[in-house]
Amino acid sequence: RKEVEQDPGPFNVPEGATVAFNCTYSNSASQSFFWYRQDCRKEPKLLMSVYSSGNEDGRFTAQLNRASQYISLLIRDSKLSDSATYLCVVNSPYSGGGADGLTFGKGTHLIIQP
Amino acid sequence: DTEVTQTPKHLVMGMTNKKSLKCEQHMGHRAMYWYKQKAKKPPELMFVYSYEKLSINESVPSRFSPECPNSSLLNLHLHALQPEDSALYLCASRGQTYEQYFGPGTRLTVT
């Protein structure tokens, strides 16, 4: 299976800072793109889908560049509660058709410091 | 409501035991997934059910046996597991734009 690559971190940043995560994917047939957040010992939770036109949800902005196969996430005015692992996730069809699945990056660990 | 439920939350079993993990969703999603996650690693896909039929088995050992009794339920039957199978087992269902919603997981320890 093709890979999704992201910087594992950890990123240690002060509260209020802006944080940027980057991710690249290798399967050009990938169809859908997401950022998930996972807290320690919890399940991954969908943070936002990522669209080619770019999309924003409050302090979070995601961008997709299909030509470069590159995805980004920007967190502005970071809060202590943003501390978590951020997973770059790509949905791709399986060979043979009939199903698809998510491929996860290894995750970037973010620590917001007071 | 984007809730996926899983039971039990925790499970400790011996290598000769047989147990089952259960997953339920009532969002009308027609694709459901089992993942295995070890500490500090991303989730790894095990099985995909699409319209209640097994469509993907990612070379999972036969000691793991999935079952989809209906469109809302997904089971994972466990038998003769090994200590290295200890992990967090996550169930997910897929929404209309291919996003997946995860249950809280079952933390499995094999002794």
Image (tube, rainbow, N blue to C red):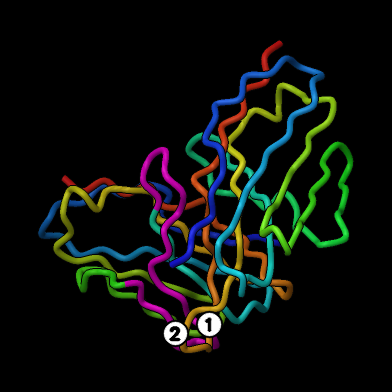
Q: Residue furthest front?
A: A68
Q: Label 2's element?
A: strand
B18 inside magenta stretch:
no
List the residue tagged with mark 1. Answer: A99
- In the image, which residues are magenta? B37-58
Q: Amino acid at mark 1?
A: Ala
Front-most of residues A12 and B109: A12
Question: Label for residue B55?
Answer: 2
Is residue B8 positioned above or below A27 on the image?
above
Looking at the image, which residue is at 78% across and 38% down? A74
Crowd rating for badge 2 (residues with CA inside 10 Å; few <14, some 14–19, many 20+):
some
* Location of residue A18 in the rendering, given as x and y in whole percent from the top left corner: 80, 26
| Badge 1 element | loop
Mark carried by residue B36? none
Tell me the quarter of the picture where residue A34 sits. bottom right
- Horizontal relation, residue B14 to residue B109: left or right: left
B41 or A63: nearer the viewer: A63
**Residue found at x 50% / y 84%:** B70
**Residue at position x 16%, y 54% in the image:** B82
